[in-house]
Structure formats: structure tokens, C-alpha cells
Image (cartoon, grey):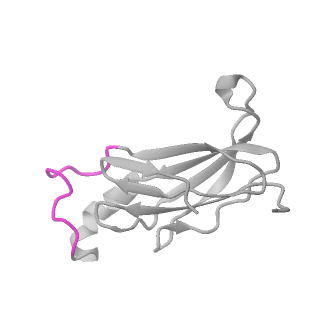
């Protein structure tokens, strides 16, 4: 049994369009206590800070969650990543596709927001599988 009084969160991003980690993506972490706002009992979101993904696509230094956190929100700023990638894809990754999709540039989803419920003492690893025209998230281990 865990003795921690709060939940903890980690994440990483894999760019599935090239099969590589997405480095340099800004990630912001927010938390709130109470039930969901739709149920009328939720508290306000508290911005806790953020980080950026490292060369392995991981955020290893996200802020700790305050006691009483029941919901967490991760905001991923993915548009700047795709803009940088489009400019240097041929130089940085020799096996990258010449065109991502019909010459399109940037990302269809400029940001990704993931909101999930947490319970004290649990660790939540939330990977983001990303490409310019879609994304998927899941609770990892």
C-alpha cells in the first residue's frame, strides 16, 4: 500500500508519423480538487507549471500535485513541434517521409488537452501518440 497522499503524473510523446520521440514539446500541468465541473462540485483549475519533452520525448520533471487533487489536465503545445519538424525533417531524420500528407504543413490539432481523474497514492503515466492529423492517449504504466 502506498503512503503517498497525492497522485503523481508523468508523460511522454511518440510521433507515430516517423516512429520517433517528439522532443521539445511544451507540456503544462493543471489540477483541481472535487468532482467534475459538469457535476457542479468541481473546483477551479490551478496551473502548476510545466516542462518540455526531452530527446526521448519524456517529461521527467512535471510539478507535484497538491493534496486533494482529483482531476489533472495536461496541455501539449504540439504545433511548434510540427513547425520545427517540417523545417528540418530531411536533415534531422534521414528516413523521414518526404511529405507528411499531400504537402500539408503544421498540425491539424495545434494543441492537445487531456483531462483525467486521479486518486491519491497512484501514479499516472499518460503517453501521447501523435501525428499531424490525429492523436491517441492512454493510461500507461
Left or right: where 20 falls relative to 58: left
Q: Residue at x 58, y 63 (%)?
A: 141
Left or right: where 114 falls relative to 123: left
Q: Which is nearer the eye, 51 or 41?
A: 41
Q: Quadrant of the N terminus?
A: bottom right
Q: Which residue is drawn at 41% across and 56% down?
A: 129
User: What main secondary structure does the magenta stretch of the protein show?
Assistant: loop
Q: Where is residue 74 in the image (x, y as percent from the top left)?
A: 57, 49
Q: Is residue 38 above or below residue 16?
A: above
Q: In this view, does 19 lie above or below 39?
A: below
Q: Which residue is drawn at 69% across and 47% down?
A: 118
Left or right: where 61 falls relative to 95: right
Left or right: where 73 falls relative to 90: right
Numbered circles on residues, count: 0
Q: Position of residue 57 (x, y in %)?
A: 47, 68
Q: Where is residue 17 in the image (x, y as percent from the top left)?
A: 29, 60
Residue closest to the far front: 1
Q: Where is residue 81 in the image (x, y as percent from the top left)?
A: 38, 59
Q: Residue at x 82, y 50 (%)?
A: 67
Residue 139 quadrant: bottom right
Q: Which is nearer the eye, 87 or 46?
A: 46
Q: Magenta includes 106?
A: yes
Q: Magenta includes 90?
A: no
Query: Over which residues does the magenta segment extend?
Result: 95-108
Q: In this view, does 122 lie above or below 60?
A: above
Amino acid at each position: 500500500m502506498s503512503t503517498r497522499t497525492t497522485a503523481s503524473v508523468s508523460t511522454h510523446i511518440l510521433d507515430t508519423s516517423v516512429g520517433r520521440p517528439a522532443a521539445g514539446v511544451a507540456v503544462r500541468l493543471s489540477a483541481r480538487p472535487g468532482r467534475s465541473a459538469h457535476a457542479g462540485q468541481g473546483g477551479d483549475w490551478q496551473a502548476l507549471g510545466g516542462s518540455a519533452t526531452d530527446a526521448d520525448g519524456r517529461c521527467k520533471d512535471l510539478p507535484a500535485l497538491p493534496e486533494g487533487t482529483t482531476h489533472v489536465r495536461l496541455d501539449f503545445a504540439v504545433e511548434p513541434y510540427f513547425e520545427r519538424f517540417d523545417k528540418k525533417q530531411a536533415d534531422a531524420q534521414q528516413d523521414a517521409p518526404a511529405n507528411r500528407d499531400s504537402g500539408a504543413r503544421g498540425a491539424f490539432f495545434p494543441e492537445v488537452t487531456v483531462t483525467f481523474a486521479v486518486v491519491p497514492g497512484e501514479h499516472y503515466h499518460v503517453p501521447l501518440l501523435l501525428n499531424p492529423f490525429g492523436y491517441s492517449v492512454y493510461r500507461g504504466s
